[in-house]
Image (cartoon, helix red, strand yellow):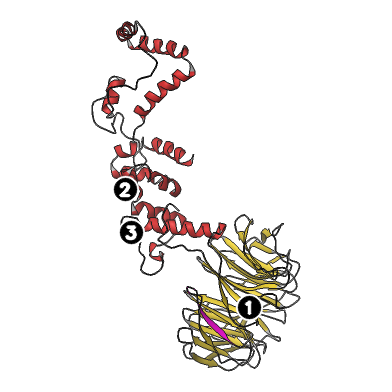
Amino acid sequence: KGFCSSLKFMKRKLDHGPDGRPFPAGKKHCKGATPTTFGDLRLANGHSAQRRRVISGPPPSGLQDWLQTFQMWSGPERLLALDELIDRCETSQVKHVMQVIEPQFQRDFISLLPKELALYVLTFLAPRDLLQAAQTCRYWRILAEDNLLWREKCREEGISEFASYRRRESVRPSPAVSPWKSAYIRQHRIETNWRKGGTGDPMVLKGHDDHVITCLQFSGDLIVSGSDDNTLKVWSAVTGKCLRTLTGHTGGVWCSQMAVATVISGSTDRTLRVWDAESGECVHTLYGHTSTVRCMHLHGNRVVSGSRDTTLRMWNVTTGQCEHVLTGHVAAVRCVQYDGRRVVSGGYDYMVKVWDPETEVCLHTLQGHTNRVYSLQFDGVFVVSGSLDTSIRVWDAETGGCVHTLTGHQSLTSGMELRDNILVSGNADSTVRVWDIRTGLCLHTLQGPNKHQSAVTCLQFCRGLVLSSSDDGTVKLWDLRTGAWLRDVVALQSRGSGGVVWRIKASDTRLVCAAGSRNGTEETKLLIMDFDLDDTKTEAD
């Protein structure tokens, strides 16, 4: 239906050129003599002059005399006769006339146009209709494979480059297929796999015995998990093998960050360690904190760590040196954000602080929460803080003023994600909420019959989707725009009886989940789901 309506729209566009101006009056779109009779038209279209015969016995007597009389009449008289004849025909007879006539007036108008104009007309088709048009005939397929045409379609969909067309190393798109078209089809498949599933069972990676996985990172094809067993493990996202175990901490690992193959970990042993995930080497051990390193944030080659010793420290990852110490909190620092210019920290003293790390000056102390601050987001303009007091506060980073207080959650806001002024918050009340921080309005509450049955443990959002994990042993997928539940991406066998999904990390094509239990009902493991497909799949899939 969509394809046909698009074709009708395209036909209307033929009355105008690429610049939007109408063609000059009387301009012909094709050359050749104009057929004078229907028989001439059939010959012009390459059909035999022999009409399809109706098997109904010999022709009626007087037929030739009737035809000669018809030919003697003028044009208006013939039209009048045809009107009267049609009125006297049965439906099956009119249908027969249509079957004979209609094919002769169906013109391949695309093939009659210059290539540039034909491509211009095809730009009005949606990508799905372009794929259908390519199956019409060989010439339409050539047009529908035009690389610049598909580049425009990719631009409309926000696909920035076909260079991101990844797949298993040596595989390359066929030279006959537009690389931009291949990129579009790949992105469409990935989107479909996220929303509808069908990628098979997840890859299961078992490790850390029965300990809790406390932090999770991945970059490229490397996954790094940290645990309260004092170790980190480096895994291959492709093979699922544990490539190496990073040992050295003498206490549980509570936080980590990763950039390419550099991993930074923080531990209850009061140190940070910088690792090379490729070799497994501990490059630096960073001493300075006097209690558990509880949080950290990496930007460029600097990482800011927050500790239960109430301080924050800025470290140079390359040299291993502590460059700045930020003091001012009077209780444990629980969360930190760093954008390369400002540091924002939240603590158990109910305070949020904005720092200039270079001068080690606290620019603003954001007061308003009435209980511990557990989560932060900072986009350079707004600071968003989540607290055990059930509220979320939006602050102006430059003035320190409270812009909005977001209310609606009933318990601790343990995790948040902020992007383009849209905030997603996960709460111990088992709900996820979507907010517009410019207006302070709650756009959606992700709940209903498919809501989580226990506290939300982690959040991610990408591709217009929200992923939420929970103590109930599931990972749920939601539509960010509508707030609708789409499906359960992960559902542990022990869900509801002790199984927990502790952490999730997502990219455009992969989801990694850290799962286990606190009562032995579920083994500690990582689940990897790949939503990309092999290029060897046919385009018709």
Q: Position of residue 495 (x, y in %)?
A: 69, 68
What whole-number distance in Å separates the C-alpha atoms at marks 2 and 3? Answer: 14 Å
Q: Would you place residue 13 above or below residue 127 in this image?
A: above
Seen as rendered, the residue at the extreme front is: 57
Q: Amino acid at mark 2?
A: Ile
Displayed quadrant of residue 338: bottom right
| Residue depth check, mark 3 versus mark 1: number of the one nearer the observer | 1
Label 2, secondary structure: give it: helix
Q: Counting residues from the N terminus, which is met first, the one under dot 3 or under dot 1?
A: 3
The residue lying toward the viewer, choosing from 43 and 438, is 43
The residue singled out by tag 2 in the image is 142
Label 1, secondary structure: give it: loop
Q: Counting residues from the N terminus, which is met first, the one under dot 2 or under dot 3?
A: 2
Identity of the residue drawn at 39% across and 62% down: 162
Q: Position of residue 151 (x, y in %)?
A: 38, 55
The residue lying toward the viewer, choosing from 26 and 111, is 111
Marker disc for residue 524: 1
Disc 2 packing (10 Å; few <14; some 14–19; many ≥20): few
Identity of the residue drawn at 49% across and 60% down: 190
The residue singled out by tag 3 in the image is 174
Q: Position of residue 118 (x, y in %)?
A: 33, 42
Label 3, secondary structure: give it: loop
Disc 3 packing (10 Å; few <14; some 14–19; many ≥20): few
Q: Tell me the magenta residue range.
A: 230-240
Residue 399 in view in this figure: no
Displayed quadrant of residue 41: top left
